[in-house]
Image: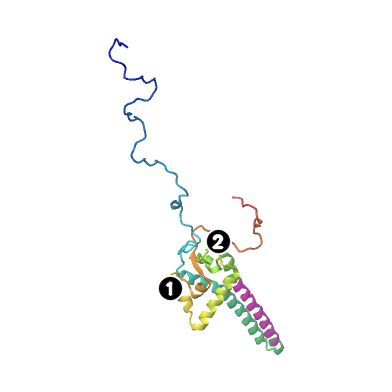
Amino acid sequence: MNYPYGGPPSGPQQPYGGPPSGPQPQQPFGPPSGPQPQQPYPPQQGYPQQYPPQPYGAPGAHPAGQLAEWGTRVLGYLIDGAIPGAAYVILYIVMMSVIAGTASSGSESGMQTAGIVVLIVGLLAYLALAVFTIWNLCYRRGTTGQTLGQKVAKIKTVSEATGQPIGFGNAFLRQICHIVDSAICGLPIGWLAPLWDDKKQTWADKIVKTVVVVVPEGQQTPQAPGYGQPPQPGYGQPQQW
């Protein structure tokens, strides 16, 4: 066959849209062959490092705050002792006045009657002081964390593990431990232990696992249950904030 314009064609031409037979050019907007860049805002889960440490239950930390100094604790002890002590002094003066007045009358029967009255009043007074002491040092400390003296000194006794009041039973046990360690040693060495102890604990504190801490300014301690207290929400009822 004669070809008017030269030799025969080299082969069938590629249709439109077919792939070229030569090397493929690189895509101008293709993904780079190197390492992929990191996302600018990768999602983080939990942000654990941004949360402050929990105040209660943190290992090695004192749950409720700054430990009270020994001098502040002594102030609380003195106030707690001064309240029943003052009541006893007043009662003693009254009873001695009654006895002196009866003795001045010279009546033997009057002296006997006065002696019986003084004995009964004295027993009732000791009973009242014992009840007050148990209420203040055990019940009040166990339920609110503070005795009357500690409230004035702005300190409180709490559990070393939870930072909460220790309850009546542990407060009573703590008081017994104070009495026992003083009786065994003959000196109140257990009371002096906060002067050199790292946690400023007495021996009774170590046995019951309590610490005495400073109440921060503006913080209110829980009130002992009593009349006029609003009722607590029942089980399963959400609290309103």
Please name the amino acid that badge 1 sits on: Leu
Please name the amino acid that badge 2 sits on: Thr
**Kind of element beneath mark 2:** loop
Q: Position of residue 147 (x, y in %)?
A: 56, 68
Q: Position of residue 41 (x, y in %)?
A: 41, 42
Residue 14 lies left or right of residue 146; in this view the side is left
Outermost residue, left direction?
Answer: 6
Q: Quadrant of residue 227?
A: bottom right
**Kind of element beneath mark 1:** helix
Q: Is residue 65 above or below residue 18?
A: below
Question: What residue did someone put label 1 on?
Answer: 195
Mark nearer the N terminus (1 vs 2): 1
Find the magenta span and give its range: 112-134
Closer-to-camera residue (23/168): 23
Q: Is residue 23 above or below residue 34?
A: above
Residue 137 in sight from this viewpoint: no
Mark 2 Cα-neighbour bin, 10 Å: few <14, some 14–19, many ≥20:
some
